[in-house]
Image: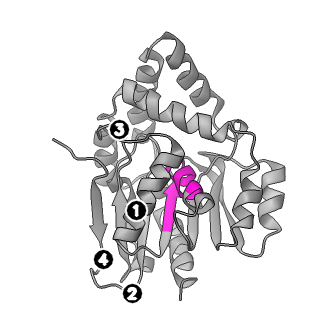
Amino acid sequence: MRGAWELLTSGPVDADRSVLLLPGGANAARSFDLVMAEPALAGVRMVATTLPGMAGAPLTGDLTVPGLARRAGELAKEHDCDVVVGFSHGASVALEMLLSGHFHGPAVLLGISMTTEDEAGFFVKVVRLSQKVGSWPMGTLLTLLPVMVRSAKIREPHKRELIADLKQNKARDAVKVSAAYLDYVAQERDFAAELVATGQPVWVMHAEKGDGDLSDAERATLEAAAHVTIVTLPGSVFLLPDEAPQQCAEVIAAAVAATR
């Protein structure tokens, strides 16, 4: 029986710096395997966790983004994490950790969406339709994810492990956690301005085409802040930790360096 908030760790137990890693939707902790193994992060303690309802992990506790941020903040304290990193859904949790005061320190937000418009329209439609007619539209989407991953430029055996984790997802659970996430980004809030107001060093990483997006207004707000760095990868990258682990690791290393 799998436990809630399962952990995957790497690096020295007595490392000077530790990083909490929050995966994207449908992904497990080991989706960060390639990032954790990058030389740029040698000597850093890495703590990845699987969020509730993701990759077959049990649903437990408060599934809203604020609820997940509260528990993730507790994990960060338990493991003395100096930096928080989130991808996609996990990036929204990391964002809320900063905004709610559950974490104080540098953050790396990979493929974050700050509004419904920033999210993939197809994903939004599938989630909202599943809430109305049952989970079968989400089930259909989940069967397509492994197909997408098979064609992605991801190293083996990580690709096989990623596909295996994706197949563990349960449509009904995915609808619950995804709906809560979409409710969060649908709020009439200026998340970019709120993020800047925290004063924390933040790295926001996107590809030219991929998971998540930033509006022109959000980008302008973030670019105007000296403590926010925007990193844009060329081309199409949908699974940043899996397809661009070196670039992700280098950004995380910069965030770790900011704590010294």
Indicate the secondary structure of the residue bearing disc 3: helix
Report the disc number at residue 74: 1
Residue that extends furthest to the top in the rendered view of this protein: 133
Nearer to the camera, 38 or 118: 118
Q: Tag 2: residue type?
A: Asp
Q: Please indicate whether residue 41 sits to the left or right of residue 205 in the image.
A: left
Q: Residue at x 52, y 63 (%)?
A: 102
Q: Please indicate whether residue 153 sits to the left or right of residue 211 in the image.
A: left
**Which badge, 4 or 2, is on the more N-terminal residue?**
4
| Magenta span includes 93 | yes
Q: Is residue 90 above or below residue 76?
A: above
* Distance in Å between CA atoms under marks 4 and 2: 11 Å
**Which badge, 1 or 2, is on the more N-terminal residue?**
2
Report the disc number at residue 166: 3
Rendering coords of residue 247 (x, y %)? 54, 67
* Distance in Å between CA atoms under marks 1 and 2: 19 Å
Residue bearing mark 2 = 16
Q: Residue at x 29, y 71 (%)?
A: 10
- Please name which of the two marks, 3 or 2, marks the residue nearer to the observer: 2
Report the disc number at residue 11: 4
Magenta stretch: give its range.
84-96
Quarter occupied by the N terminus: top left
**Which badge, 3 or 1, is on the more N-terminal residue?**
1
**Which badge, 4 or 1, is on the more N-terminal residue?**
4
